[in-house]
Structure formats: structure tokens, C-alpha cells
Amino acid sequence: MNTTDPEYWKKLMVNYLFRDHSVEQLRSIASSPDSHLHFPLYIDFAELMDYDPRIAQLIFSQSNTYLQLFDDAALLAHRFVLEEMAADEKNNVVEKKFVHVRINVGGSPLECPETFPSIGRVRVQHRGILLTVKGIVIRSGAIKMHEGERKYMCHKCKNSFTIHPEVEARNSISLPSMCPFQKPKPCGGSKFQYVENTIVCHDYQEIKVQESTQVLGVGAIPRSILVILKDDLVDVVKAGDDVIVTGLLTAKWSPELKDVRCDLDPVLIANNVRRINELKSEIDISDVMVMKFEQFWNQFKDAPLKGRNAILRGICPQIFGLFTVKLAVALTLIGGVQHVDASGTRVRGESHLLLVGDPGTGKSQFLKFAAKLSNRSVITTGLGSTSAGLTVTAVKDGGEWMLEAGALVLADGGLCCIDEFDSMREHDRATIHEAMEQQTISVAKAGLVTTLSTKTTVFGATNPKGHYDPDQPLSVNTTLSGPLLSRFDIVLVLLDTKNPEWDAVVSSHILSEAEPDRTSNDEDLANIWPLSTLKRYVHYLKEKFRPVLTREAEAVISSYYQLQRRSATDNAARTTVRMLESLIRLAQAHARLMFRNEVTRLDAITAILCIESSMTTSAIVDCIGNALHSNFKDNPDQEYAKQERLILEKLGCKDNFSDMNIIED
């Protein structure tokens, strides 16, 4: 037994592939009619360790050599399977030329911090081992043809050998100074001739992966690493995708510049790439936590709105009052249910919120808290933190055009918080309409034509242009166009008007927080839900509940929509159509917030109150007032009963509900 002989390890690898479930994968590969495609063969590293720890150790510590040997073993195993299947005349099988082993490190010891570091902690010590990193794709390069190997023949001994390109030398091929054949005695030849038709080409793509900002502390700069994808791995991810990449860490020389020191740039040659977009919002919610949620709502069964307000108090607890804003933030983060009709037209379920207000009204505080509350979030300004801005742009890197994802693409599946929303760049203003409504961005730049996903909730904040004039429309006060404003489900205007009573209450609240000895609010603070509980609650609602509209809710929403259509001008007609969709989303979000799977009349009327809060002049409610001065009621259920009667009377449908014995006297 010669353990230094590669053939010994190849036989062990073939034996493992036949003992493992990989035989089914090999049969599937053999059934494919195309012999020139590159086929992946997925192996769990944890199972390989159980079978033979020695093979696992060699693949981990000497990846460059033994991963290639594993590919050769997979090809040999494929031929054995092919012979078995060819014996059966019913099978039409074709021998394949390329089978690549893809290592999955999930659930194995390689998920430890030493072999699964953050991108910013990748060091020289990781070079040459099987390394795994996690991040988000910020750039995606074009797919190229890459020369993987070619054969040369020695003039002296007439033996041929294979030469592979060197990544360190920017994929250039260099011939050895002496013939590599040393048996039975050294050849010593130094002249070689290329063997015709022996070049093997591969698909080749470069992407840039950046570590997630969610795991970084304040002031930390997110680092990125270049990842090389080959063969079946190309074009499996795009800009904005969350990925886990397993591969071999190496380096390549940076471009040579005159009078500039040439450094080595780290590069990860990918062996396996996993998209984890569907897993990126997963949070561990125990059965005990779910039971607490159910017990909470059983406690407030007779006063549901009081229970709802108890949850809302946990949103930005450092800000006094602003009940309307906190309700709007909660409904925006929870969102509605995506709807796809029979024709395939998709209506988004994500809601959008815009806060327009004077400086010092707490807009940025709500943005930061919402970013913490969301499982996946990007917070930026209207100008954008990178050259990509909010959407996407084409950048030239090393002579090649690549797509760089902006904030909306990076926040796909989560929340995008945009401060100074009115300061967007011109190309962002042109494309953000599609990003907010159709939840895609169509790109046609520098010859790159594609569509990127932006299934994200937009939470914007902006100051009015000068002094806010209530007599002027919102588009004039904010310099935002009407079509863009119509994309927002809720637009709240926070005006810092002079109100002596409100100023006295707010100043008393701020002073009480500044004095640590005052304990008058200790009981209230103890009842506020902490951020971790709120985060789990919002995630559980979005995963668990798919509320549907009841007849009562449909009747209320339909009556309000018809009232708005009668009073709307021709220019505002399409705005009211979007408003109907916003009403449904907000009603569904409120039903989720109330821990229900059906949208009741309460949810529909609450959605109407939120829409009315977005309007400068309320159509049916006269008591909305300034959202900045809205506060929590002592008896919210009784206050709601009064508003319900008023709204139903204005809508003209109170008699219908009275006949159905819905309204209680």
C-alpha cells in the first residue's frame, strides 16, 4: 500500500462514490444526451469525513491536487456506471468528458471560524486550503472562454505532458525549463512542441463578493474578494444574490504599472456556489416564543387594539408619541400578500413608506430602527453610497465592463432605507419607478442587457423644499414627481407646528429620560417589547399568515375607492387605482399584525385611516390632524368604535352593515 501514489487515493474515491448516494447522480449524468457539457457531482464533506477522514483531510489541506484527483475519480466512476447502463439495451447513454465534484461543507467541521471566516478576515494562512466565505454579489462579470490546459511533447523523449495556466500569472501559460519526465532516468530535454488539437477550453466568469454589512460593527468597512467561476458554475448567480462560496484561495499579480509596486490580490477559485436568497431571512423562532405570542393575544382578546398598541410602543421607544408613524412603520415592514392573477400579472405585496417632515422630527431615527428590525436591510442616502447609486450601473474593471449593484438590488428580499430621498441622481429617478412597482430593474448599459430583481420595501425620508405650504400639492413641496409619489403606499407629513400643549408633554418626556432617578415610567418600559422579540414577531407574521379579505372588508374598501374615484380629477385617476392596491396591502398587513389570517372590517378601516393620514385634506375623517402630534390613546378600542361609525356614515354603507347585524350599538 503506497499512500503517496495518487492512484491509491483515486481508487478510494471511486469506492466512496459507489457506496454513497452519488450513484444516482452518476446515472442521471449518464442519461444526458450531450457529451460536451460540464456536469456537477455534489458531495457532502461531512459524509466524506465519516467514510474516510484521510481523504477529507487531503481535500481540505491540499485542495489544488486532490480536488482534481476527485474529478478524475468521478469521471472513472461515471464510466463504470455507463458500462452497467449500456448492458441494458433500453438505456441510451453517452460517455461524458467532464464531471466536476462540488463539495458542500454544510453541517461539517469546516463551518468553524478558521475555515469559514468573514471576507475581511481572510489572511495568508488560508492560502491553499478549502475555504468557505459568505457574502453578497456586488459585481458580475461577462462570461468568457478560458484555456484550461494544452499538451506539449518533448523533442528528446517524445513523451507528452499537460500544462495548465497559472492564476498567479493572470492565467498565462509558461513552459517548464526541463522535461518533467524523470523515470526511468531524467530526460533533460528543454525543447517542446505543442500537440495539435489538445487545447481544452472552459467557461470562465469573475464575480466580486462583499461581506454583509449586517455583521459589521459601526465604522467597519465591508471587504470584498474576487471569485472565479468555471464551467457549470458560471451564470448561476447575479448581482444582488446572497451566496456561500467554497473554493481554493490563491492569489494573482495585480496589473503591472510603471513605478508602482506589484502586489498579489487574493482570489477564490470556486469549487461550489450556493445561492441562499431563500434562506437569508431565516430567524430561529422557538415553539416557546410562538406560544408567548399566542398567550399575548389571548390576554388581549377582548381589547385587541390595546394589545396592538402595546406592540407598537416597542417601535422607536425613545421617541415619544408619533402613533401614526409607528403604525405606518409596522404595516410597511410586515407588508401584504403578493398576488398573481390568471394572466400571470404580479401585484407586489411589499409596501413603501415616505416620511416628509421638518428637521428634528425623528425621520432618521425611524429609518435606523426599521433597518435594525428588518432581517436584511440597506441604509443609504439619495445620492447613493457607491457609483451604482440606488439602482445599478456599469463599471469598467480591468478593461472589462461589469454590473455593479446599487442599494435597491442589494436589499432584494428586505428593506431599503433611503434618507434625503429628494437628492436622487437623475438616472436613479428614471429607473426607481420600475424598481418600486414592478420590483425589477431593466439594465441596458455598455452592451450589458439584463433584468435584476428588486423585491424590496422602500422606506424613504426627505425634508420639504423650504417652508412647507399646505396649500400646495406634495409634489411642489418635495420636488418629487407625482408618479413617483404615487408608488408610496403611505406618505406622512410631519410638520413642526407650534403647539404649546404638545411642546410641554414632549419636554417633560425628554427631561424624565435625562434624570436617571425618576422611575415613573419604569412600569411602561417593562411592558415594551425588546427589539429581538419584535424582530422575531415580524418575521413570524410574514412567514405564517396569508390573510384573505372578508365580505365586510371588501365592502368597506370598495365604497371608499368609489368615493375617491368620484372626487378625483383626471390627473389623479391612476393614483386612486394604485391607492386601491395600497388599501388591500395595508389591510392585509394589519390583519397580520393582529395575528389573524382574515382581513376584517377593523383592518380595512385602519388601512383607510392610514391612507387618510397621507392626504393633506382628509376626504372623510376630520380628526386625523398632524401625524407628528398623534399619540397613543388610553382606550383605543372605544376610540376606534367612534371612528368606525363616522367612516361608515361618510361611506354610505352603515345601513348595509346594520342589516347584517355587524355594528354593535
Image: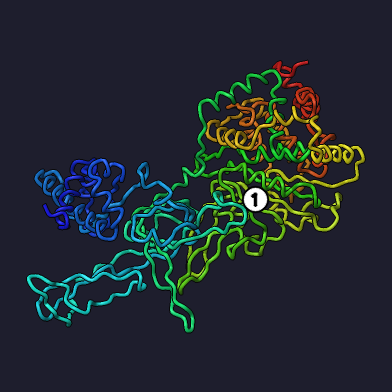
Quarter holding the C terminus?
A: top right
Q: Nearer the viewer, residue 226 or 509?
A: 509
- The residue pinned by badge 1 equals 417
Q: Residue at x 71, y 36 (%)?
A: 327
Q: Residue at x 10, y 80 (%)?
A: 156
Q: Residue at x 71, y 43 (%)?
A: 490
Applied colour scheme = rainbow
What x and y, as percent, mark residue 314?
69, 35
How would you rate the neighbour count of disc 1 (Cα within 10 Å): few for under 14, some for 14-19, many for 20 or more?
many
Does residue 348 appear to the left or right of 228 in the view shown? right
Amino acid beneath label 1: Cys
- Is residue 13 positioned above or below 524 on the image? below
Can residue 373 be seen here? Answer: yes
474 relative to 245 in the view: left or right:
right
Instruction: Provide residue 390's location: percent of width, then percent of height.
Output: 61, 58
Q: Residue at x 49, y 58 (%)?
A: 120
Q: Is residue 451 visible?
A: no
Relative height, residue 170 to residue 529 (above, below): below
